[in-house]
Image (cartoon, grey):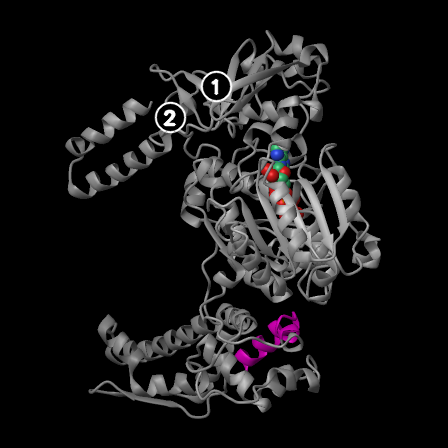
Amino acid sequence: MRERAEALFATGDQVAGDAYAAETLGRTLARRVAELADDPTTPLFFGCLDFGPTTADASPEHGSHAGAGDRAGDAADSRPGDAANSRPAANGRPGDAADNPPGGDRLDGRPGDGGYGWADHAGRRYHVGRRHVTDERGEPLVLDWRAPVSRAFYRASARDPQGVRVRRRFGFSNGMLTSFEDEHLDRGEELGTASRILTAEIERPRVGPMRDIVATIQPEQDELVRADLADSICVQGAPGTGKTAVGLHRAAYLLYLHRERLRRSGVLIVGPNRAFLSYIAAVLPALGEVEVEQATVEDLVGRAPARAVDVPAVAAVKHDARMAEVLRRAVDAHIGEPIEPIMVSDGSFRWRIGLEALHRVVAETRREGLPYGIGRERVRARVVSLLQRQAEARRAESPSDTWLRRMGRSRPVTDFLDAVWPALTPEGLVHALLADPGRLAAAADGLLNIDEQALLTWAKTPRTAKTAKWTAADAVLIDEAAGLIERPAGFGHVVVDEAQDLSPMQCRAIARRSEHGSITLLGDLAQGTAPWAATDWRESLVHLGKPDATVVPLTVGFRVPAAVVAFANRLLPALAVDVPPAESLRRDGALDVRTVSDLSTATMAEVRAALAYEGSIAVIAADAAVDGLRAALAAAGMETATADDPTAGARVTVVPATLVKGLEYDHVIVVEPAAIVAAEPRGLHRLYVVLTRAVSRLSVLHSAPLPAELR
Ligand SMILES: Nc1ncnc2c1ncn2[C@@H]1O[C@H](COP(=O)(O)OP(=O)(O)OP(=O)(O)O)[C@@H](O)[C@H]1O
């Protein structure tokens, strides 16, 4: 396949008719060559499925489907002879055959083989890998893990073998197959989480950025990954239960199944900060998906860069859901009543539109509830059409387009618009609101009390919106205003990670971008550290515009060893959230909690000891202590990295507690928990995040007493 693609790429310009076609073809072929490039770290396949001789033998309860020949809804199923798979399109995928599959995947997983079509696979053997591989005749050798038939690799069980006789998993290391494990599902064999290949993958020492988990996705994760594009879901999962992994694999899955649609509308991943985004950045490209936008909420709403900081009380009001209504009223207040008729001349005639007609135009447009800026143009269009009607009546012919345009831009019409529906910019609106207590009072009447209004108004008013020093919270307000004035472009699917920290107003910013698409919301209420952190997913989902999304728990932990989970869980009762407890799959791992007299010296010794093991090492401390620890490590000759560059060579990273959310390290050294707790109002939640970053070993060093909850 690679040779063929390279040969096509080399000769592509000779077959294309014109320069544009040659360029498009060249780009497609170049992408194809890049997609097929060898990845020396992964083998071509990681699994194999042997379907039983007849479905009836392998799975009696589904036998009735065997001869039914009902293949409706299986358009994207990969099977021999299936045009979608055996003669792949240039991109090697089954095109968009599965958009609107009649028997599509559903979260609730229907019984029987409806949509799976495993009856047709009887007696066949398939390898499963990261991408489709076909032989020179176009027959499939390896199926993409996302193809419908590959689902059996993740979901078949002894109880429900889905036609599979034997499932084989391959272990691999640096691209070499190192082991395999067979489950004879037809004989009732099933390893589940006892799989040694799964255990080895979970216990593998971590280095560098996050990796994909395609080879070992678990059934409950797969169900979320393969949820329908139309389904919005919210995943509540304890630390390390694979929420981030599920979100990223779902994005890859949806892009595979709905390639064309999502290429047009786009897929967005929202993460908490730069360090997190660079940690996950390589996962989707490794799965062949390079066209996914990854951003923080600040990036999304960042049309005005933050150049100032709000005090917490002010930020709290600005992030409150009531601000949406305040802004809506503030926009609405700009719409006025016509007070005089429009008189306009076209050089030959004078035209007049009376007050009553103008009132009707404004009232009708108001009723339509359009974004304000679009409403303004609608009013203009209606005024012009009234003029057009008069002109037609007088001249018995339609005026030209030029005439219509000229009238629409004429002084009297523009003056009228500026009076009753003045042009507004989002920045201008927020500036006017924060600068003018009277205007704010009118918009906030009955919503914000006097003290809250006082918090919002500027002490020293910037003269114009352009000179204002906006804060991060102002940017969210400006984004809300932009949503009231313009129609924002949206995405086909949005994955939101660490969603528990989103404020209602930030949720609304994401809702505007996913109004016509679906979302995957990932988070853990126990890890909420923002002042406005969610305590109930239902509320977040309402602000996100998806009140009916299913909330699904993930409760199996793949990262944190059981002993460390038990230690961190001592904090849970103090965190005031109702979350299902998780169970760690990891029985190994070490926890060491020690009182030390000198934190810096002890940290140094601990890092040295950790360097004797394989894997990444993180020193996590209260933000204020980070520079000192970095300097001490440097003075001792130890090279350290920062969290936003996981590809850096150094094995030791010093991470401020506020930046470590979502990240993981093999060996974690937590320095002075009491200082981490004391540094912020939701310090205990922060400490819970910090204590759950360790994959293999956690050392806790303290000179001050531990927080009471941990003792
Ligand atoms: N099915 C799996 N097979 C192998 N490894 C897995 C699996 N699921 C998750 N993991 C691994 O477990 C670790 C934790 O996963 P992930 O970061 O997605 O969890 P999370 O729920 O987002 O955690 P947090 O709440 O801390 O952000 C990662 O190293 C991930 O690769």
Q: Quadrant of residue 684?
A: bottom right
Residue at numbered disc 1: 79
- Viewer-side residue, 179 vs 391: 179
Q: Are marks 1 and 2 in contact (CB under 8 Å)?
A: no
Give the residue type at disc 1: Arg
The image shows residue 425, relative to residue 580, as above or below, that is below
Mark 1 or mark 2: name the one nearer the start of the chain. 1
Residue 660 shows in this picture: yes
- Residue 95, position as x, y percentages in the image: 41, 33
Kindly identify the residue that appears in the image at 52 percent across and 26 percent down. Answer: 74
What residue is pinned by disc 2?
A: 88
Question: Predominant secondary structure in magenta?
Answer: helix
Residue 348 x %, y %: 20, 87
Looking at the image, in which quadrant does ligand 1 appear? top right
User: Could you give the CA–CA distance between mark 1 and mark 2, rounded to whole angstroms?
Assistant: 12 Å
Quadrant position of the N terminus in the picture: top left
Q: Quadrant of residue 96?
A: top left
Q: Residue at x 67, y 22 (%)?
A: 195
- Amino acid type indicated by mark 2: Pro
**Residue ranking furthest to the bottom:** 340
In the rendered image, residue 332 lying in the magenta stretch gets the answer yes
Specify whether residue 264 is painted magenta. Answer: no
Q: Nearer the viewer, residue 272 or 104?
A: 272
Which range is magenta? Answer: 315-333
